[in-house]
Each structure stands twice: as C-alpha cells, then as structure tokens.
Image (cartoon, rainbow, N blue to C red):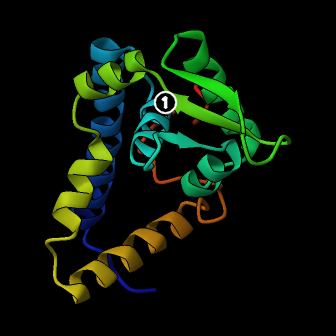
Amino acid sequence: MNETDPNRVDDSLIALRRILRATEQYERDLAASAGLSPAQLRVLQIIAGKPDASATPSALAQQMGVSQATVTSVVDKLVARGLVRRVPSETDRRQTNVILTVTGRSALDEAPDALQQRYVREFVKLEDWEQAQLVASLERVAAMMDAHLIDASPVLTVGAIDGKRK
C-alpha cells in the first residue's frame, strides 16, 4: 500500500462536498424561484426543445435515462400545475404526447440557468483529452463510492429524481 498525503485526501473530500453543496443550493434556488425540481425543469426543457413542443413519456424517459414510471410521476406533477398537458397521439392511439403549455413556457423562461447547463458550457470548452480524463476520474470516484451501478440521469439533483424523498 502506498502512502497518501492526508491533505490530498482532505482536498478530495472537500471537492466532493463542494459539488454536493452546489447541487443542493441549486435545487433550493430553483424551488424558491420557479417552484420546480431539477427533474421537472429538465422535462420542460426537453419538450421545449422538440420541434412541436411535444414528446412521449417513453422518449422523455429515454433521453433522461430514467424509468417511464419516474417520468410519469414528474409529468403528473407538471400536469397538476398546468405546465404541460397530455394529449392523445394523432398517429398512434396507444400513445400519449406531453405538450408544453403557455404557462409551462413562462415557467421555463423564468427559471434560473440549470446547474448542469453551466457545467456543460464549461465542459465543452475543455480539450478532448481533458474531457476524457475528467469523465474517467468521475467514473472512478463513482466506483470508489460503490455508486457506479446506481441508476442516474444527467440531472444534477440530490434527491430522488421524481421528487420523492426516502
């Protein structure tokens, strides 16, 4: 076993804690300013990014990397607030489309910049080798914490993605 600089261990733990705290703070700020969870905001963003401002729950689940049940829970909350609505598909009667409402567009326009969007803006500025190194390092950290097999989506949040706390 090699010797590890105790300061380096502390520095790594401090960096992890800062990431967690930034995520927690963003979640609180988003809830306070827009009344949305990061997952709800992401659903609105995905739908708004579609040419017809419409998406199926299965397409949302696939893009977010979560189960359809999770998306259903998030969409239920958005429907209850009038931010989206469900409409039967005109091409496949077995499917339902989730459509952004005018109220949903306003909520999206007024929401603060998503934490993951800030991350993406900075990440894409990195050289290819830096991106690869960072991804490898983050995957290694996840493995060190036995978190590499945990189902996760590209939504930076500290709670359950559907807003349910355990």
Q: State the residue at coordinates (22%, 82%).
A: 130
Residue 1 rendering spot, x and y as whole percentages: 46, 86
Above or below, comparing residue 115 to residue 81 in the picture:
below
Q: x, y (%) of residue 143?
A: 55, 69
Q: Amino acid at mark 1?
A: Gln
Q: Position of residue 26 (x, y in %)?
A: 29, 31
- Pointer 1 residue: 40
Q: Nearer the viewer, residue 124 or 9?
A: 124
Residue 165 in view here: no
Quarter of the image with the C terminus is top right
- Decide: is 158 above or below 63: above
Give the tally of numbered discs. Answer: 1
Residue 119 drawn at (x, y percent):
24, 55
Residue at image x 22%, y 37%? Answer: 113
Give the residue at x 30% y 36%.
21
Judging depth in this view, the residue of 62 and 97 nearest the camera is 97
